[in-house]
Image (tube, rainbow, N blue to C red):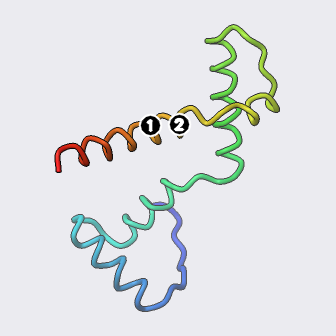
Amino acid sequence: MADTTTIQVSKAARDHLAQVAKERGMTLGQLVEELAAQQRTAEQIAERLAADRQAAREVMGADISDEEFEQAPDVLGNIYRIAAEKVRLARGAAA
């Protein structure tokens, strides 16, 4: 078995997590392990960002600097904004 330790949380947090674990058919320890595995450290996030930018550079065949990436428009955010506006318009027309 893996090394284990104790963490301290409020009773309310423990009880809440225990209920979530029960509903998912797992132990509280398994739930905490799952939650911990889903969280990324700042270093992991930076590594992923660097890898994603490198992949984008390779696909585009362009040597874009990190500064240029930072100044680029939020394309995905703009797509979401446009889609949300279309949904609002469609709902307004249907009313």
What amino acid is at disc 1?
A: Ile
The residue sitting at 70% across, 31% down in the picture is 72
Residue 67 lies in quadrant:
top right
For label 2, the crowd category at 10 Å Cα-Cα, with few meaning under 14, some 14 to 19 and many 20 or more, is few
Q: 30 above or below 83?
A: below
Closer-to-camera residue (3/49): 49
Q: Position of residue 19 (x, y in %)?
A: 27, 78
Q: 81 above or below 33?
A: above
Q: Give the side of residue 82 with respect to residue 76, left or right.
A: left
User: Which residue bears the numbered disc 2?
Assistant: 78
The residue sitting at 71% across, 48% down in the picture is 43
Say if mark 2 contacts mark 1, CB within 8 Å. Answer: yes
Residue 24 lies in quadrant:
bottom left
Q: 89 above or below 14?
A: above
What amino acid is at disc 2?
A: Asn
Q: CA distance from mark 2 to mark 1?
A: 6 Å
